[in-house]
Image (cartoon, rainbow, N blue to C red):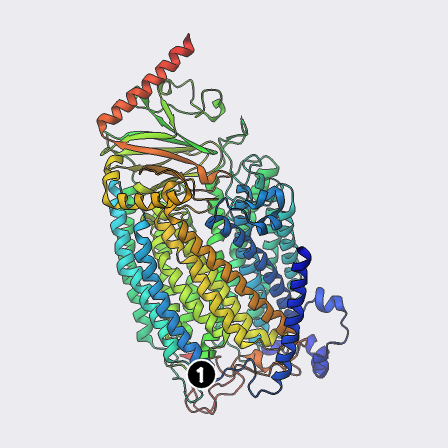
Amino acid sequence: MGTKHTETALEHEHATHHDHAHDHDEHHETFVSKYIFSMDHKMISRQFLITAIIMACVAMTMSMIFRFQLAWPGEKFAFVHAILGDKWAKDGILDPNMYLALVTIHGTLMVFMVLTGGLSGTFANLLIPYQIGARDMASGFLNMLSYWFFFVSSSIMLASCFIEDGPASGGWTIYPPLSALPEAMPGSKLGMTMWLISMALFIISSLLGGLNYIITVINLRTKGMKMTRMPLTCWAFLITAILGVLSFPVLFSCALLLIFDRSFGTSFYLSDIYIGGRPLDNVGGSPILFEHLFWFLGHPEVYIVLLPALGITSEVISTMSRKPIFGYRAMIGSMLAIGFLSFIVWGHHMYMTGMNPFLGSVFVFTTLLIAIPSAVKAFNYITTLWKGNIQFTPAMMFSIGLVSSFISGGVTGIILADSALDINVHDTYFVVAHFHIVMGLSAIFGMFAGVYHWFPKMFLRMMNKKLGFLHFWITFISAYGVFFPQHYLGLAGVPRRYYTNSNFPMFDNLVDINEICTIFAIIGGIGQLVFLFNFFYSIFRGEKAPQNPWNSNTLEWTTPVANIHGNWPGKLPVVHRWAYDYSKPGQEHDFVPQTVPLAEGEHDGGEH
Amino acid sequence: MKLLVLLAILLLIIAGHQLLRIIELSRGLKKTKDWELTNSDNNAMGKLMLTFMILFLLAFFWQTHRWIDRSLPGSASEHGLKIDWLWDVNMNYIVVPVFLVTNFILFFFAYKYRGNTNRKATFFPHSNTLEMIWTIVPAIALAFIIIFGLKYWNEIMADAEDPNKLTIELYAKQFDWTARYGGKDGKLGTTDFKQIGGTNQVGLDTNDVLGHDDITVKNEFHIPVGREIELLMRSRDVIHSAYLPHFRAQMNCVPGLITAFKFKPIKTTEDMRKDPYVIHMMAAINKQREKFGKDPVIFDYLLLCNKICGENHYNMQMNIVVESEKDYNAWMAKEQAKKTGKAAVASK
């Protein structure tokens, strides 16, 4: 299938240049075309990563501010005042509207900018062409546009934090009418408009990227790279991209209708409202329509965030256990099943919205079905570790962390998916704990695993292992420390998005739990400095990367240690086997790269 | 002061830079690279994985032991008892065991199979039997969860059909609640949001005579024990959510819609105040309140807003008093007298 693509223009142009590639002055490249408007998948991947890291820092700082407020409501904090100023934190006490704004933007940045744009953008861009043996993405130009839409979108979202009325503050789910009516809260004025514009641009970026990933995987696989030989990372990126392409347009229409309601007087989501001392003209709309549209994206979105992380860990766990991934086909099958089911479960976010209860029971059924492929994945990871020869690189440790958080957060999903049980914990901290652990932690651990593992391919240098260990343990322990206790807040009935719990005497005995969460958040936040230092320091001063530092089978490790256009000097590699021949009996080494031909009578692992 | 801080930061940067230079220079002398794993790394990290697992699981038990009695008291409504039962079954027999066992195995394997240059991993790419097991076992467990969950869900969400039911409307707006009773005829009048204003704060349709005797109350509403309560919910402005955690009841209040939730309270407020679990809980709460310099409180049922609704979302509450039918009737009579009294004053 891939043969006809081996003779690309890029090959002619760059095949002879590989010798010079490492000395930073490639031919015909200006600073602008190399570092800014680059069409090279590796550069775009790095652009996504750096942008996502900046966004993650902003979002984490925001969470730090509201965690202080939750643990010590009414106390004065100089650092809060220093960041937010007199208007939003008079004397260092956080303003309730700003609290909601911080919660909202924290969620938006984390879900969309960091874990969707950042995670897929970085690793799908880096790994798809590398691992399937392609010169670049199918369309370098669309790929470049994808990044720049993402950049503009992120910039607008950040800029909205500096306007007079503050950024959007109706929660990251921006349910109307709260988000539709400027009278309802200051954040629903200009801030909300900017949020919607930013999101529209983000969706464009995501679609351009997603289409590119799908086309590249389908068309540009090198000779011998059958779908059943493809690394699970590429499978994950492919399924993720399909989910995105099918669901993001729905969010776009959802946002568009909201823009109409806000700016052009339509009534898609509005009806029978009296606000600001007068009845509104809007009649006939329904906020529940918005919720349906929003969650039709919103739920696949969870898997858009999670699947790339699962793909990355599949690769890392297999490589670092020095064992083939257990149940390769089952892993693909479960990802396909999760991807399919993710489209028919959105209603489980809406059991308590007034949606017809019968519809709710259908969603209970479909939602709980997702537990089956998820369980298959978790057990397959664990079995991959069994009788392995586990190499604890920081990437491997984060991958094990992911499996743990995927399980610990996943099991409470069984409770929340059950509508009868959801009644009393819906929108409480039990939900906050659940989705932060299963989605937030798992995805961010997957992202860290990817950064540590493929850093040598991205920046041609190595990250320091000891700092990596330190970073892992701080992050892992404090992440559980922040979110695990929140289950108990949920059991006590604490609603989420409360500026303070001190107005209800029934929550007074929960202060110490909130303090514990905040203390761990502080430790975890500071721990990320270790990562930032290791990351930026290693970019410039890390040890030089060898050809194949992790003794890995996949194709990216056959490229020269240089960022050259077209990835391989000369001909593209030809693939003869699946990616997981680790510790195969009868082989000299404990790994057999995909480019090694099958011996006589040898059985290809992906074929069973 | 600021200058000092700046100087300190500058010094730290210089010190850090020097330290890095030393490390970089000594790097050339070392045999091992600062990214390559050694046996001792693997050994140490494997042991740390095991240590983490033990501490993590201990922390789980410690938290549960310490904090579980801060959970909401047992359900004060009839259907809530079923929810509590189903919750306990799911938690104790599925969620917690799966959580404990899989985390145990995960970290134990990580420790047991920690890498070593002498080890060789076992080539074990797949096993249909194993994969079938962990497809079918979860499927069976899920069948149980789904069957019971849906059975209760359908019961709980069925329309209120008890002829003796008491219908109350909860009306939400930024940022308070109003409860409306049917008055003498027991029937709620229809509403029209365009007529909101003046004394008509809930938007009664003045053309509908059914609504003329409706009683509205704020801050606190009363319900009789042992009778089915049908809550109808409306919102004036944005989405709110009526959350009555002690009764295991919750439903969003959506502008333009009337949503409903029914429940039968089985314990009066006084019953709850005598419940040993609640007494213990309130003692802990009052102990904490004393530290804050706040007055002690007694137990009350509460209605909270549980859907983000704006600035004062965190302070949108209403007391609920559950009492005997007799006390409830007395309270209702008083509220009705208040209304006629007010009307009499107005007509003068």
| Quadrant occupied by the C terminus of chain A | bottom left
Q: Is residue B143 left or right of residue A319?
A: left
Closest to the observer, B323 or A214: B323
Give the residue type that dot 1 points to: Asp
Q: Residues within 10 Å of mark 1 (few under 14, many from 20)?
A: some
| Quadrant occupied by the N terminus of chain A | bottom right
Residue at screen point 46% across, 73% down: A397
Residue A376 in the image, given as x and y percentages of width and height = 37, 68
Residue A353 in the image, given as x and y percentages of width and height = 41, 42
Q: Is residue A324 visible?
A: no
Residue B241 in the image, given as x and y percentages of width and height = 41, 39
Above or below residue B207? Residue A315 is below
**In the rendered image, which residue does mark 1 sit on?**
A604
Residue at screen point 68% across, 62% down: B7
Q: Is residue A22 left or right of residue B58?
A: right
Q: Is residue A42 visible?
A: yes
Of all chains, the one bearing label 1 is A
Above or below residue B236? Residue B65 is below
Residue at screen point 61% across, 38% down: A263
Secondary structure of residue under mark 1: loop
Q: Is residue B154 left or right of residue A507?
A: left
